[in-house]
Image (tube, rainbow, N blue to C red):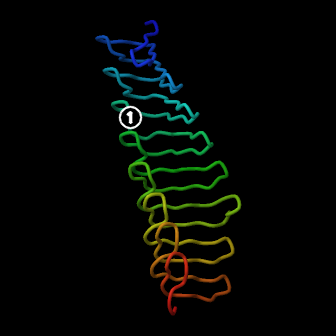
Amino acid sequence: REEHTFPNGIKYTGQWLLDEPNGEGYQVWPDGRTYRGEFRAGKADGLGTFEYANGSVYVGPWINDMAHGEGVCTLSDGSVYQGDWVNGKQHGQGTLTFPGGTKFVGQYLEGVKSGMGTVTYEGDRAGCSYKGEFLADAFHGEGLYVWDDGRRYQGQWKDNKMHGHGQFSFSDGRRYVGQYIEGEKNGIG
């Protein structure tokens, strides 16, 4: 069918059923976003590719106009997320790989890293890693951070800082076991 422009400025070209996009189609928003894929009852539903105005691209399943299922999103900065989506957000197990090679593998909750996960660093932090709990995209809860020179911290974290009880092991074998507050040793260890 020929291109149709809706009152809100969205343009659609593709198959129709009962005056609604249904089947294969291509939709363009006034701000430059595009969707190419399957439609059902006027909404993206099935497999499709969505390109954001900023250049990010999501490829995967859709339900009711939202990314839903296992999909891949290549962000405009070159980062790639591959994993679960629920109601348009990263939710469940996923892998986020940054352009320099740093990688997060773990759990997402409504679009942010939350739950168990592992970060393996590359670039200027190559050889460093973190394995443990996350909350709202930050190290939070129990976790192990290993530096490239052999230092290690096993313990509690809050907002990406050592916070609570933990053990810091130096590369020469010395250890500190005790309390941390916002990344700093606190009290006698």
**Residue 185 coordinates in the image, percent (x, y):** 54, 84
Query: Residue lying farthest bottom?
Result: 188
Task: Relative to 85, say whether 28 is above or below.
Answer: above
Q: Residues within 10 Å of mark 1 (few under 14, many from 20)?
A: some
How many badges with numbers are in the image? 1
Query: Residue lying farthest left?
Result: 18
**Residue 88 coordinates in the image, percent (x, y):** 40, 39
Instruction: Tell me what residue is drawn at x 44 percent, y 66 percent.
Output: 133
Query: Which residue carries the number 1 mark?
Result: 66
Does 26 sit left or right of 74 as displayed? Answer: left
**Residue 158 coordinates in the image, percent (x, y):** 46, 70
**Residue 92 coordinates in the image, percent (x, y):** 40, 50
Q: Amino acid at mark 1?
A: Met
Does 57 sit left or right of 37 as displayed? Answer: right
Instruction: Tell me what residue is drawn at x 54 percent, y 25 percent.
Output: 32
Q: Which quadrant of the structure image shows residue 134?
A: bottom left
Nearest the eye: 81 or 8 = 8
Instruction: Tell me what residue is drawn at x 52 percent, y 71 percent.
Output: 161
Q: Quadrant of the N terminus?
A: top left
Instruction: Tell me what residue is drawn at x 49 percent, y 29 percent.
Output: 49
Query: Residue lying farthest top?
Result: 2
Q: Which quadrant of the structure image shows residue 65?
A: top left
Does 64 sit left or right of 149 as displayed? Answer: left
Mark 1 residue element: strand
Does 114 sit left or right of 55 as displayed? Answer: left
